[in-house]
Amino acid sequence: MLIFFIHGVAARTSQYANSLQSLLEKEFLQRQEKIPLFYSGFWGNVYRELEIIWNRIDNAQEPLKHQEFRKGYLSQFVGDAFTYLGS
């Protein structure tokens, strides 16, 4: 079994699910069941890099040059937010 954690929008560290993972591991041990694999999806470090990219875009000579990139990023972010809300 795999338990996949998806972080919220404000998570800024890859250890956001560690305490929950520990609680789940204890519960599985207590029930004498096999401990599942855990994975925490994280892209908070990408966000920091995107801030640099946005800075370059905002200060570019041709501000409309990277419009497609901005639309794509916004679509992904909003899509993720609606996915989390709908779960």
Image: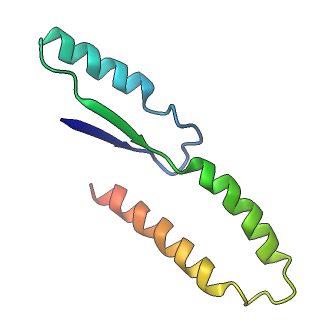
Could you tell me residue 80's position as x and y percent?
Answer: 41, 62
Could you tell me residue 4's position as x and y percent?
Answer: 31, 42
Could you tell me residue 83's position as x and y percent?
Answer: 34, 61
Which residue is painted at 87% across and 87% down in the image? Answer: 61
Vertical order, 19 against 68 (above or below): above
Q: Is residue 12 left or right of residue 29?
A: right
Which residue is painted at 55% across and 47% down in the image? Answer: 10
Q: Closer to the camera, 71 or 82?
A: 71
Vertical order, 77 against 17 (above or below): below
Q: Residue furthest left?
A: 32
Which residue is painted at 27% across and 13% down in the image? Answer: 26
On the rendered image, what quadrant is the N terminus found in? top left
Q: How is the image coloured?
A: rainbow
Vertical order, 75 against 38 (above or below): below
Q: Is residue 49 left or right of residue 34?
A: right
Which residue is painted at 69% across and 53% down in the image? Answer: 48
Q: Is residue 9 left or right of residue 49?
A: left
Q: Is residue 40 left or right of residue 52?
A: left
> Could you tell me how many numbered marks the image carries?
0
Could you tell me residue 13's position as x and y percent?
Answer: 57, 37
Residue 79 found in image quarter: bottom left
Residue 54 found in image quarter: bottom right
On the rendered image, what quadrant is the C terminus found in? bottom left
Vertical order, 82 against 10 (above or below): below
Q: Closer to the camera, 45 or 20?
A: 45
Residue 64 found in image quarter: bottom right
